[in-house]
Amino acid sequence: MKNKNFKIAVFNVFKHKRRTFFNAMTFAINMFALVLLLGMIRGQYNMMIDKTIDLQVGHLKIYKKGYVEEKKRMPLEINISNPDAVIADVMKLHHVKGAAKHIVTTGTLSSGSKKTGMMFYGIDMEKEKTVTTAFNKVSGTALSDGGGEILIGNKLSQLMSVEPGAMLMIYARTKDNANNLVDAEIKGVYTAGFEFMEKSIAVVPFDYASWFLSMDGAATEIKIALDDKKNTGLVKQGVQKILSEKYPDLIVRDWIEEAPEIIYAIQMDMVTYGIIFAILLFLAFFIIVNTLTISVFERTAEIGTLRAIGMQKDDIRKMFLTEGAVLGLIGVILGGLLVLPLVYYMNVHGIDIAATGVEDIGVPFEPVMKSINRPVDWLISGIICMISAALGAWFPAGNAAKTDIINALKRGVK
């Protein structure tokens, strides 16, 4: 009987081709949208996290104890006195790609006619390139190890109307809170693709920053880059072990601790995407309920006949549930195939979003947004569509099972 019910259900699905087409297309559109959306969500957040790690926080950062609590004022007196020794030990760990020491402070940058508040980073350019791609695109020349040099962002260069070769004055307070004013020549202009960084961060050679800020070779932080962010927890444990054994006055923080706003933004966006998923689910649910309810009404006589020849209520219910499942399955297969070309394009080429002003926001973004789809996306989307099909078919199937045989047969008599 089960096999017979299935055959009747499949026959009914393909008997009403027009109705089947529109129902299947509803599930296909849902399948199409879900697969595409899952890939775009994963691609967007991976891009945002990877760029934040690259341009701002690194996978891990090491600080002197007490620095994080005072981080907003960027205290130079709370520093890592022996950063080179710490870096040498950290670089021995597996999965560590690079580590670089920084001196971070605030001050004022002046061209004579224009001035602006800035964040200044003292860096070792050679080591810096192992932890970030921010300075890969430089107009002019990169920083040397000498003094009196500065690298500014492309946006700041435009705002201050200065180019490589121009002289700037740097005003900042030293570690001992004394005022200091030094000259620096613009050696180059970097383009990081992140406007906030380009207009608010200038970099100078580490030794030069150490000299004019009276740091005596100390650093305020050490930025660590890994081969993959999936290894962050493992490497963090290794760094913590090193620090506890050799540098007990230091702490390590991972990128999640350093950029909690990213996690918060993702959580808020997931609420929005959850609403979109719910709308798609409800759409498929509503359409299958509507379609099968009409089908039950139109096939009242047929249901009465099947009941009269011995088909039980459960068999009627299962027949309509099977019809809903078959419609859902057709839509899942169709949608899963139709989305393949667009998934390929989005994963390989992506969409250029540079013209949308993405550089203006406070979170790093790539100018091209790509999707990251995995086989599990088709499985998840297919399951969601099949669940909506099953739920949508449940109520009409129940109504069909309750059909009174005598009234149904009477309705079939003309």
Image: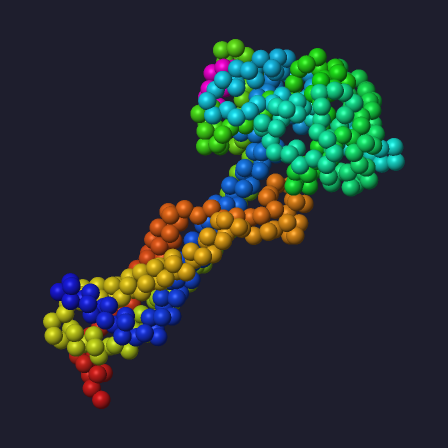
Q: Magenta segment, principal secondary structure?
A: helix
Q: Is residue 236 visible?
A: yes
Q: Is residue 316 visible?
A: no
Quarter that holds the C terminus? bottom left
Q: Would you say 19 lies left or right of 171 here?
A: left
In the rendered view, would you say 153 is above or below 378? above
Considering every residue shown, the one lying at the far bottom of the view is: 414
Q: Would you say 356 lies left or right of 372 here?
A: right
Quarter that holds the N terminus? bottom left
In the rendered view, would you say 82 is above or below 127? above
Q: Can you give x and y, in whole percent of width and height, for residue 274 in the image?
A: 46, 51
In the rendered view, would you say 275 is above or below 184? below
Question: Which image quadrant is residue 305 in?
Answer: bottom left
Question: Which image quadrant is residue 100 in?
Answer: top right
Q: Would you say 386 lies left or right of 361 here?
A: left
Q: Can you give x and y, in whole percent of width and height, for residue 123 in the image?
A: 67, 24
Considering every residue shown, the one lying at the far top of the view is: 246
Residue drawn at x 35%, y 59% is: 332
Residue drawn at x 61%, y 23% is: 127
Considering every residue shown, the one lying at the far left of the view is: 310
Of 93 and 411, which appears nearest the observer? 93
Q: Does the magenta portion include 212?
A: no
Q: Can you give x and y, in whole percent of width and height, for residue 38 in the image?
A: 45, 50
Residue drawn at x 66%, y 25% is: 125
Question: Which image quadrant is residue 64 in?
Answer: top right
* Count of labels in the image: 0
Q: Can you give x and y, in whole percent of width and height, for residue 131 in the image?
A: 58, 28
Residue drawn at x 64%, y 52% is: 356
Q: Does the magenta portion include 237?
A: yes
In the rendered view, would you say 372 is above or below 117? below
Considering every residue shown, the one lying at the far right of the view is: 113
Span colored in magenta = 236-243
